[in-house]
Amino acid sequence: MSKNPKITEDEIALIKSAQSGNMPAFNKLFHKYEKFTTQLLYDFIKDYDEARDINNLVWLKVYNKLSKFTQYSSFGGWLRILTNRTAIDYLRELKPNKYVPQNLEDSSWSVADVSSGDSIVDEITYDQVLKEFDQLPEDVRKVFKLYYVNNLTVSEINKATKIPTGTIKSHLSRNRAKLKQRLTN
């Protein structure tokens, strides 16, 4: 998945201008970040044309929610979360019988996070994922939640928790493989 774009002072000024209702500024934001959001959607949906269509919905949400946005340095992260949630909502509507949590804010885990794009989502239930997730050690659970639910990068998790980046990567890699193996057997 794409990394969060780095934001500059000029982009912060552009965001503030768009927040005040300046449509040319909003259009510049759209053109700057459109490929980023499309790629995020494609990572979930695996259909480029569909991702491009849903991207319009993402940007409608950005337009409607931008006035409340205040954490300018984390614009890329905010945009990533909004895009991921839009993709999950779309998939939930497309396949309503799949076990994806109904409220991501209250959820500590998402079936889509376990799958990493594989068909494992079709083979397991949400309850199975939660059961396996609860068996992880507390420090690993914390890393998983920060990475998958809060969409933080490894370096952001390192800064927030002071856990070494190598340990974070190890937790993610080793335990993701273990979870996938246990859930598919």
Image (tube, helix red, strand yellow):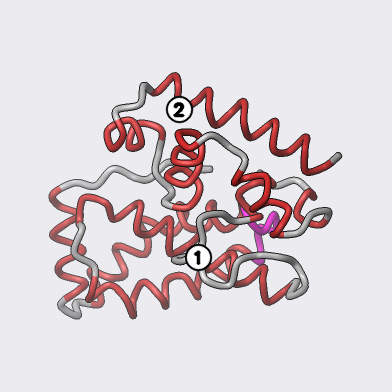
The first of marks 2 and 1 along the sequence is 1
Residue at image x 46%, y 70%? 58
Q: Report x, y in % for residue 7.
A: 24, 47
Q: Report x, y in % for residue 17.
A: 15, 69
**Disc 2 from disc 1: Cα separation:** 23 Å
Q: Which SS does the magenta portion mostly show? A: helix
Residue 4's disc number: none
The amino acid pointed to by label 1 is: Leu
The amino acid pointed to by label 2 is: Ile
Residue 45: say if magenta.
Answer: yes
| Residue 175 left/right relative to 143 | right
What's drawn in magenta, residue-wise?
44-50
Q: Which residue is mark 2?
A: 168
Residue at image x 44%, y 66%? 105
Q: Report x, y in % for residue 120.
A: 78, 49
Q: Residues within 10 Å of mark 1 (few under 14, many from 20)?
A: some
Q: Which residue is mark 1?
A: 104
